Amino acid sequence: MLRQCREAQLLSMDLQQQLLREDPFEDIARYVRQSGLIGDFQRLLYLCMKLYFQDDILVKVDRASMAHSLEVRVPYMDRDLLEYACRIQPFYKLRGLTTKYVLKRALRRFLPREVIHRRKAGFMMPVAVWLTREMRETVLDQCSPAAVASTDCLILSLWSGWSRSTSESAAIIANRFIRCSVSWLGGATAE
């Protein structure tokens, strides 16, 4: 029911039919073919470099740093270092559940164990905090049945799913909620 409601509100019938005819993984398959790589692990790392780093993370870092007149360096993205790292056998990159095995091994003489083995920390915006504290009343007002009469099916389902979640993945839902709200309620285009 929710899926049908979303499709009916967001996509014309012609666009739905066009999307059903297209292969959503066409670009990924092309990258894999062009890479010439055989092993799944090497293919996955290549796709991460092409699609995640090159076309996502590095673009965002570049834009954000330029917007604030910052010069950002990405030392692990040095071409020679990357080419060398690509030649390292997968066994040395991932051993059991230990990622970056060879890097951690190389640095253990220089860094404390706690630094080498600490969990990853991202740079997420505190959207979940904003929506549950400072912006809570605004969000509730914008999600009232009167405010979202034409889009309540999607927006309220996103809000409902997000507000019940206790994990950090709730930020993803919150991000979608904000983008949809800005687009639909304010008439702006969500990027």
Image (cartoon, rainbow, N blue to C red):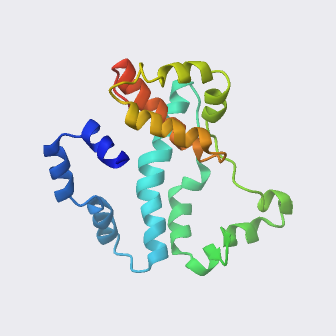
Looking at the image, the residue that sits furthest to the left is 14
Which x, y percent locates residue 133? 68, 25
- Quick one: 60 or 168, which is closer to the camera? 168
Say which residue appears at 69% left-offset and 54% top-offset: 120
- Quick one: 24 or 52, which is closer to the camera? 24
Residue 7: quarter of image? top left
- Quick one: 118 or 178, which is closer to the camera? 178
In the rendered view, would you say 115 is above or below 61?
below
* Residue 73 showing in the rendered view: no
Which x, y percent locates residue 84? 54, 69
In the rendered view, would you say 46 is above or below 140?
below
Q: Quadrant of the C terminus?
A: top left
Say which residue appears at 35% left-offset and 25% top-offset: 184
Q: Is residue 191 left or right of residue 138?
A: left
Say which residue appears at 41% left-offset and 31% top-offset: 180
Q: Is residue 69 left or right of residue 97?
A: left
Which x, y percent locates residue 58? 49, 45
Q: Is residue 136 left or right of residue 191?
A: right
* Residue 90 showing in the rendered view: yes
Which x, y percent locates residue 95? 66, 78
Q: Is residue 141 left or right of residue 95?
A: left
Say which residue appears at 63% left-offset and 35% top-offset: 128
